[in-house]
Structures are given as C-alpha cells and as structure tokens.
Image (spheres, coloured by chain):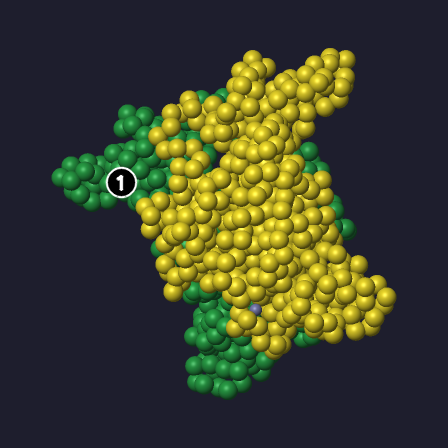
Chain colours: A yellow, B green
C-alpha cells in the first residue's frame, strides 16, 4: 500500500508503473508501442517506465513479437514485454470443510506450485487446522522459492463471514469457528520461519474483541513482523467471484452475481468490476434468503432459507445419500445417480434448482445484474439444476427483456483458491514500487 | 455536463468552483476561511473562486458570521457565504397514479413554488397526462421567475422502470404506459414556450425503439432545443432515495435500502452515497421479490411477490376497503380503522409487515446495508407494520450482531417530488461554470 506522506512525484510514478504492468497483463506479450497506445502515454515515457520494471525484475523481454501480432506495428518485429515468471509471487490458501489447499501464482497468473491435504474441518479446533495450514503454506513457499519465486503475500479463503478489513472469521458455522482471528497462527507462514510457540488461533469470547495474537505482541494484523507476509483473509464466495472476474473475463462481465455453493451457499455481487462487501463485510448471504418462509428451521435462526433446499446437506439428504461422510464420494454418487436417471436424485436436484431460481429471481429483481455465474460445487450439477432454475428466473423476473445471462463457472470448486492466490499476487501489479528487486 | 475537449485548466476550475459550492451547501452560512479549511485549499485560491461565484450570482454574502460560530475564527466576525436564492433553480415533477405535482427548488434547497393537480393516471393516455403535466410545469416555472429564479433543468419522477440514461418509461403498469418516451411531450416545458403541435407522447410498438420526438426532429433527448430545459427522467423510488440521502443525512447513512411504497412497491439501493441503478437501470424491484412462491399470481408473471401482500391494492382489499376509488380517502379510512383497533385492518397490516420483513431480510442478507428506510405511502402506517417487519428481519438476518437500523422516512410520499427537484438543482452545484450569470 502506498505510504502516507509519499511525494506526489513518487505516487505518480507508482501509478504509472502499475498502469504499465496492468496493460501488459491484460494484453499478453506486447511491444512498448502497444503499451503506449493503450495508455495514451508517449513512447518516451513508457520506455522509461519499462526500463525501470525490467531492471526491477517485474517485466522481462521475450523473443520477437509476431509481425502484425499482439503489439508491434505490421512487419515490425521486436522484443515483446511479458510479466516475469521468476520474481514475486502470491500465495493463496483455502480452508475447506474437508480439505486445506495452498497454491502459488506468479505475476503472469500461472499456478506454479500447489499442495492439498484432506483435513476434516467440521467442528474443528482452529489451532489444529491452522497449524496444518501453516505447514502446507511453508511447503508451497519452499516449492516456489526453488522456482526462483519470492512470496510477497498470503491470502486465505474461508467458508464464513470475515469482518471487513480484518483477519477475523466472525462466523463459520460449518467449521464451528466464531470470532476467530487467524492472523496469529499464520504469522510467519511462508517465510521459512518456524511457527513460534505463541502462534496459535486466538478465539475471543464475544463478538467485539478483534485483537489478534500479533496485536498483543505490539504488531498489527496484516503485517505481523518484518519477515511475515502481509495477510489477507476473505470469504470464499468473494474470492471465487474475483477469480471469475480476473480469470474468465471473456464470459463473465463486470456486473454479475456469483453463486458459490459449497457446504453452505454464498454469493458475491460484483458491480462495475468492484466487489460489494456491505457495511460490515457480510454482503452476499444468498444462502439465507428466504425461499419458503414457513419451511424448515435454518442454522441462522430463520426458516426455509435457500440453504435448506440447495445446500449440500439438504441436497444429499433429499437424494437419500449420507451427508456426514466424505464429500467427494457423496458428490460422485449424486452425479452417478443423476446420470442414470434416478428419480429421487433428479427430484432433489430439481427442488434445489427451483429454490436457487426463486432466490436468484429476487436477487435479479433487486440488482439487475448482467449475468449470474453458478460456481462452486454445484457447477458440476448444472445439467440437472438449470431447467428449474431458468424457469423460475424467467417467470419471476419483473423487468422486461431477457433475464441476465446464466454462466456456469469454468473454475468450479477451484475458484476460491485461485481467487486467493490472484488477490495475493495482484498487489505486485497494483503497487510495483514496493516489489522492485 | 462538461464538454468534450475542454481544457484541463477549465476542468480544474469547474471542479474547484463545484467543491466550493458543495462546501457551502453542506456547512450552511460560513466564512471563506472555513471553506478553505474544509477543502484543504489556500485562502487566496478560495477567495478567487468565491469572487467568481459571487459575480456569477451563485453565492451571496449574508450579515456577519457569529463569533466562533458556523465558520469564522473565534471572535472574528465577517460576512458569511450562502448559496443564492435568486438565481438558477431546479424544477421537479411527479407523475403519480392519481395526481401530478411540480415544484421549484432554489440552490439552498428551499421549495419556492409548487402546484398539484388531482389527475387519474390509471390506464391513461400518456399524451393527455403529459399535456396536463406540461401546463403545471409552465405554471410553476412562471411562479419561480416571478421570484427571480431561473429554471435550469426539469426532472420527472415516474412510477415505473426507466431505461438507464434515457427519457423512456419502459414499463409503468399502474399507468398502463409501455415504452413511452416522454421527452417530446415535455419539450419546451418550463421555458414559457407553448407546446408545438407535434409535442405529444411518442409510444413505440416494441421495446427497442428509444427514438424520441426530439430525436426525429434532429435534436437529442435531454436537450431538445436551444431554449428547452434539459430533461431527466427517473424512477420514483430512485428519486425518493436520493431525497433521503440529500435531505435527511442526519438520520440516513450513505449505505441504505429505501423502500418506496406507492401503488406498487419499489426500492432503491444506495451504496457509499451512490445509487445502484443496475445494468439496464431496472434495479430496486423489491415489489417483485418472491415472498411466498406459491402465492397469488402477480402482474410480473411471478407468484407471491411482495406486492401481492404489501402493495396498496392488496393491502386495501385485505382490509376490506375498495382499492379502485380515491387513494387519499382509502388510506384515511385504513388509518382510522387501524387506530380504532379493527381486527381485519390490523391483520392486513400485520400480513403486509410480515411480507415486507421477509423480502427485506433477503435484501439485508444480500447487501448488508447500514439502514433500511421505509418511505412512500406506507410510512404513515409504520406503527402497525413495524412489529411484524422487525420480527422477520431479526429472525431471518443471517449475520451476527444487530440488523440494520430501521428509519421511517420523514419525507414520506413527498420524497420522489423533492428528490426530482433537488436532482434538477444539483446540476448547478455540480457544474457551476455552465450556470454563472
Ligand atoms: Zn438461514
Ligand atoms: Zn411480481
């Protein structure tokens, strides 16, 4: 983040370096001339900025641009600029209900290292889970460094509500975590340091105490020590939506609602390319939109919420499958039964699709988005969910014209992890001055 | 609007003049020093800008500032700056289902002239209604000019969907207007010109044809002739929400959902002080959020929408009152019966409050706003609606902590008209260079 009191000249330089990096990221390999044209800067100005980024190891030069291709003028071959694949990198982590996952993404957006651990997180001790996660982060950071990559930030996706601008998981019912600040337990993760004795999850009693282990040591969340990676903690649905926005801009517009169905059902609203976080950071709770107000009691205290029809547990139970065993096996069984035309399974999926359609019709009537993206674990069941979902959307959307486009996520359950890693590495593009070699 | 190709110096001047006017508008009468402190500009710079605004008739000087009071330094009396009340003004108009209303607001935000006409708009001919409205606009403009005010813009609130950035009412079911561009019929209104023969509502057959009478004459919508006032057309719920934001900032925060209940039920979502319009301009259709998905059929094609329980017609019918007669009489009867404890009336209001609570719980779960503002015709029934509404909100909001504050609008049914007039006059504050005398 830009420091306070930085000179206007330095801010301008930071901003222009960032614009050059974003231009190269969006265009792919391209010439200095193409960057200048895109940004409306002179070639001289762009050359100065590019030289600094080349020297600082954030850009590199690559072969020659194809004549008339992505950048150079017709018949004018030259070297093409690309983002480095051997400099800073972002670490993304995911705390799932049945697994932990970590990956490293380079500034080009390529996943360069990853690790996954089956780990039952239901009603878990945050200290135990976060110690496991820390080991996994260290492992991926080690792999990344072996590839000449330098982790600069760690972003963690969690299946719960995160208080806006903090590292505190306010509520993750499927993990059984409440008011859990995860910064302490992850302090120093990915840097090669070993966890200190005091680095364990700090669970506070009430909902108001957002102190962290780091804070008690006189450090602030997000920058726990000179060596620690800055830490970003966000809801999995938010990071999944950002992954769609950043990685699938061909199909996903800049105004959309992203449904992220895992054990719970979350959503994220993106408007003009910005995530709507809500006053406290709790926006997107699609799973608790009332669908049938007199329906079954929900964990949230309400009745007949979407999650009671389209949530994983409700769906598996309605299909006659066990909901407390391994998730992968249960979903595979569900998919097989649906494929063979099993009536009970098809009915359960139709009921889930209907409930999704009712909740999304309300959402569309409120927000008028350009698209609805179906992501997370439910994306693989789109074939069976969609007829009912589309019917409800069509019948219940009030505005004239066609309802928003329905897009099935290509990232599926990978979205939150990729979104986290990309959120972590994008800090390099946004603030290159802090990451020059 | 700032012209294309304006010089950067002129843009900077426009921006700084606007900042000075907004500072005076927000602070009330204040000294040059107070403006400089607020904007972080030098006193010299502010003095130059203030002189230009005084010469141009947008600011005036008033008596002396109270020592230590709203602006001057302690014990340093001087003249206070105030916005003019004798320069440009905005005209706001409202097309209601049973009335037309117009008012003029000066740059201080004071209503200086107004007119109202009972006019049955149900299933009406837009040409007839707009001719009446035009007469009313001319009348108010005449009153305003007699007060040395100069109308600079006309904004019209309509009970229906307006295609974003156009003057076309795409759908207003309670008026029976579809794809109706109202610019032609209002061309020249408020300028003293008489309507030309061709100036009547232009109704197109399909949903795609947004040509206007003006456009066919080679003019563009929003600036129909050299003399015509620029025209802004917006949904009544949007303008009602902006009125809350601009006129009641003490109670209404900058992130809220505004419920605007007239014959239909609309809503507007304001985030960080900006109105969420949606991709096509159709956001805020709270009235068609499904409440009981198997409930009664709705005009939108859905079933069990909020409007089927809390809409005016549904509410009056449930209370055993006629819904096709004069609205004022019906609402007065409803209020009287509720006050005397009539069971059927109380039940109808409780059912409406419950339905509002269910739809708003979903909205709050999705958007996490800081407040919900209950406006429009239902505001006067708050006493009877609120217990059920608050109960549903409390039980069905998923996030921990207290649900958003519930605010009963102080503007009530006046909101859309005031919002329109304020939207019209704010153009002077936003773009003072175009309105200097
Ligand atoms: Zn719930
Ligand atoms: Zn409806």
Say if A74 sits above or below A59 in the image.
above
Q: Residue B177: where, in percent of width, then height?
A: 68, 57
In this rendering, position of residue B14 left or right of residue B200: left
Expressed as whole percent of the image width and height from the top left, the position of residue B299 reads 69, 66
Q: Is residue A56 visible?
A: yes
> Do we see residue B415 in this rendering?
no
Residue at 38% in and 64% down: A206
Q: Residue at x 61, y 20 (%)?
A: A36
Can you identify the residue that label 1 sits on?
B30
Q: On the rendering, which quadrant does ligand 1 occupy?
A: bottom right
Most extreme residue toward the left, as rendered?
B75
Relative to A58, is A105 above or below?
below
Q: Percent x, y for residue A26?
A: 65, 31
The crowding category of the residue bearing disc 1, from other C-alpha atoms within 10 Å (few below 14, some 14 to 19, many at least 20), is many
Say whether residue B405 is left or right of residue B319.
left
At horizontal 51% and vertical 78% (from top left) the residue drawn is: B350
Task: Give percent across and percent down for residue B410.
Answer: 40, 62
Residue closest to the eye, B433 or A328: A328
Quarter of image, res A362: bottom right
Subunit bearing disc 1: B
What element does badge 1 sit on? loop
């Amino acid at each position: 983040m830009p420091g306070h009191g930085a000179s206007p000249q330095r801010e301008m330089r930071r901003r222009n370096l960032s614009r050059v990096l974003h231009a190269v990221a969006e265009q792919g390999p391209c010439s200095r001339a193409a960057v200048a044209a895109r940004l409306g800067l002179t070639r001289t100005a762009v050359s100065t900025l590019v030289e600094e980024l080349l020297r600082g190891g954030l850009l590199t030069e690559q072969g020659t641009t194809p004549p008339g291709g992505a950048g150079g003028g017709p018949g004018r071959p030259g070297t093409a600029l690309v983002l480095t694949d051997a400099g800073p990198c972002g670490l993304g982590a995911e705390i799932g209900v049945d697994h932990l996952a970590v990956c490293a993404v380079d500034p080009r957006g390529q996943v360069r290292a990853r690790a996954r651990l089956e780990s039952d997180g239901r009603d878990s001790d945050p200290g135990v889970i976060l110690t496991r996660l820390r080991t996994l982060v260290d492992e991926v950071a080690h792999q990344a460094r072996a590839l000449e990559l330098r982790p600069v930030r760690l972003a963690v996706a969690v299946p719960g509500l995160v208080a806006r601008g903090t590292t505190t998981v306010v509520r993750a019912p499927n993990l059984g975590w409440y008011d859990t600040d995860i910064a302490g337990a992850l302090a120093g993760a990915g840097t090669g340091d070993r966890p200190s004795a005091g680095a364990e999850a700090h669970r506070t009693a009430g909902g108001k105490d957002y102190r962290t282990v780091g804070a008690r040591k006189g450090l602030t969340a997000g920058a726990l020590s000179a060596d620690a990676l800055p830490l970003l903690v966000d809801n999995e649905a938010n990071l999944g939506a950002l992954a769609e926005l950043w990685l699938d801009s061909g199909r996903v517009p800049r105004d959309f609602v992203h449904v992220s169905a895992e054990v719970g059902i979350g959503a994220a609203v993106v408007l003009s390319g910005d995530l709507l976080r809500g006053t406290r950071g709790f926006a997107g709770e699609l799973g608790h939109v009332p669908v049938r107000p007199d329906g079954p009691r929900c964990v949230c205290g309400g009745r007949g919420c979407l999650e009671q029809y389209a949530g994983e547990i409700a769906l598996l139970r309605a299909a006659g499958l066990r909901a407390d065993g391994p998730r992968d096996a249960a979903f595979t069984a569900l998919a097989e039964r649906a494929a063979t035309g099993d009536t009970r399974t098809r009915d359960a999926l139709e009921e889930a699709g209907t409930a999704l359609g009712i909740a999304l019709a309300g959402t569309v009537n409120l927000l008028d988005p350009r698209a609805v993206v179906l992501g997370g674990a439910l994306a693989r069941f789109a074939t069976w969910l969609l007829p009912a979902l589309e019917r409800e959307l069509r019948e219940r959307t009030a505005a004239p014209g066609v309802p928003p486009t329905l897009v099935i996520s290509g990232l599926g359950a990978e979205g939150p992890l990729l979104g986290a890693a990309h959120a972590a590495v994008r800090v390099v593009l946004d603030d290159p001055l802090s990451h020059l070699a």
